[in-house]
Amino acid sequence: QVQLVESGGGLVQPGGSLTLSCAAEGSITTIAAMAWYRQAPGKQRELVATINNSGGTDFADSVKGRFTISLDNAAKTGYLQMRSLKPEDTDVYYCNGKIYGPHLEWYDLWGQGTQVTVSS
């Protein structure tokens, strides 16, 4: 069974940094693309950043210049590096992976979510 497991959330002061990880567990060939979303209670899920396996990236305007997204297919893991964090970055963060399996299976999977709280 293939799944995405997130880690790295927590409490950080304004101006601080956190790195979120999203690891693919199970038998896969490659993570073709990964995206990070965030969602506050009662609000729609917001796209934060995307990356493909050619290294192309895109970011929401609200995080440009502060967040970096990366993908390490050797480690089967994607990362979201967040710096200069603001209270308005407080949300549950979800990763989404587009993944190929060894027999050309295609998976579109979500991580379980990890809470990021920015507060003094």
Image: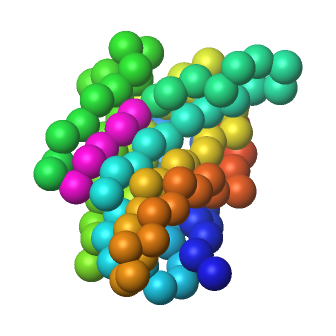
49 left or right, relative to 87: left
Rendered-image quadrant of the C terminus: top right
| Residue 11 seen in render | no
- Report x, y in % for residue 60: 40, 20
Marks counted in the figure total 0
Q: Residue at x 50, y 27 (%)?
A: 47
What colouring does the structure picture have? rainbow
Q: Main secondary structure of the magenta part?
A: strand
Residue found at the far left of this picture: 54
- Report x, y in % for residue 12: 61, 42
- Report x, y in % for residue 55: 17, 48
Q: Is residue 64 above or below residue 70?
A: above
Rendered-image quadrant of the N terminus: bottom right
Residue found at the far top of this picture: 61
Q: Residue at x 37, y 83 (%)?
A: 102
| Residue 97 seen in render | yes
**83 and 14: which is toward the camera:** 83
Query: Which residues are drawn in magenta?
Result: 49-53
**16 and 49: which is toward the camera:** 49
Q: Residue at x 32, y 70 (%)?
A: 30
- Report x, y in % for residue 108: 53, 54
Query: Residue 31: which quarter of the image?
Result: bottom left
Q: Is residue 63 above or below residue 76?
A: above
86 left or right, relative to 28: right
**39 and 120: which is toward the camera:** 39
Query: Residue 101: which quarter of the image?
Result: bottom left
Residue found at the far front of this picture: 104
